Amino acid sequence: MTPRFGVNYVPSGDWFYSWFAPRWDAIRRDLEAIAALGLDHVRVLPLWPVLQPNRTLIRAEALADVRRVVELAGDAGLDASVDVLQGHLSSFDFLPSWLSTWHRRNMFTDPECVAAQAALVGALHEAVADLPGFLGLTLGNEVNQFSSRPHPAPMPATPGEAGAWLDTLLAAVPPDGRGLRLHAAYDAVWYQDGHPFRPTHASRYGDVTAIHSWIFNGTAQHYGAMSPQSIRHAEYLIELSRAFAADPARPVWLQEVGAPLNCLDESEAPEFCRRTVLAAADSPALWGVTWWCSHDVPRSLADFPDLEHSLGLFDERGQVKPIGKAFADVAGQVRSSAAPAARTTAVVIPDGASRAALAPGGAVFTAWMEAAERGERPGLVLAGQGDGLRLLPPAPAGTPGVYHAVSDTDMFPS
């Protein structure tokens, strides 16, 4: 399987606020520029309150706008996936008013609210699924961050309730074979003990596993931004997700990965991109890489964490940055390379291992990274699995973890 290479589309100029009044000429230019880099798809993220401002109102005009963006992507030669519940983007929450303040209800457990979300999932699928370049629907962007700390106003759910929410929303997509059905979580799902969304949710619900890899989660701060641990963080997450998958052939989509300049120097970003993608592409399970993001957030927009103004492959004037060229070059390199061999060695995740043990600095993470640096090309398996593999033990229990879901220095989940 040759991996796909694309970008999370952040509209130039007005950022995601462009959904209030799309500027079609600008969107067309953005998408043509993305295609000119040699990329093959975009991830489209409309704002939830624009789509569904009232629990029983799904705006036909907003659905038509999403369809038009997917059509313009196709015109540029790009396939497009679409997210539904935005939800959360670049440190800002975009919850509809019927879930907040005087009308506060739990999006994961309130039956009427869950039904409303399922209706939106179904409506958005019907709005775009017939288009030839449609890749599929993601339920939303890192929606698990609403369920637990460090969110300032979480909507609590149990693991069972999280699973029921996923079942209901994924089932809202008709089984018509038109596009993938998936959901996306930020890395608390893998690393944060007590988080209601579990690794099995990420690896067993939907058609593919979506991985969001960011090194500002403690990895860069502890090991260094250009360390092997940071460069291989995305690769590690891909292999970690495979350990929890019921289907050993399940594809893994590196749906978000970026080069945050609160950890990296700008001069390091292109090489970080190149080495990170090459490491991730060494996993036979990789479906594709979707870089975060297409365009820098303009400095004229206020209150963003500073790193959000520098994550694009294009600057705010639409000029390709060195990291844009690096991503295009490494995509071409991977496409022209032979498929990676299967992994024959694996680190064992012990029965009862905490998620802290899986996290950066934890025992399992440490054992995997040490094996990788020895040239082992390790996978990961749950205890009692891994027939036919050479199994490596984890590092000693009690290895201190360094993961944090969010810090006090603008390291928000994206």
Image (spheres, rainbow, N blue to C red):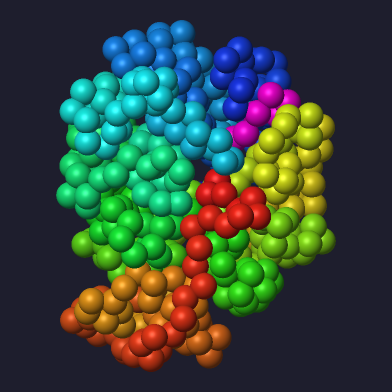
What number of labels is visible?
Answer: 0
40 relative to 202 in the view: left or right: right
- Which region of the structure is painted magenta? 7-15
Farthest residue, direction front = 102
**Closest to the observer, 68 or 96:** 96
121 relative to 191 in the view: left or right: left
Is residue 130 in view? no
* Prevalent SS, magenta region: loop
313 relative to 165 in the view: left or right: right
Residue 324 within the magenta-colored segment of the rendering: no
**How far from the left and from the top, in percent, is residue 386?**
25, 80
| Vertical comparison of 227 with 297: above or below | below
Q: Quadrant of residue 373?
A: bottom right
| Vertical comparison of 340 with 378: above or below | above
**How far from the left and from the top, in percent, is residue 269?**
74, 59
**How far from the left and from the top, in percent, is residue 407?**
57, 57
Identified at 60% across, 46% down, the residue is 292
Identified at 43% across, 74% down, the residue is 341
Quadrant holding the N terminus = bottom left
**Closest to the observer, 23 or 40:** 23
Identified at 40% across, 30% down, the residue is 84
Is residue 191 in view? yes
Q: Quadrant of residue 389?
A: bottom left
**How far from the left and from the top, in percent, is residue 103?**
34, 21
Q: Quadrant of residue 381?
A: bottom left
Identified at 26% across, 25% down, the residue is 113
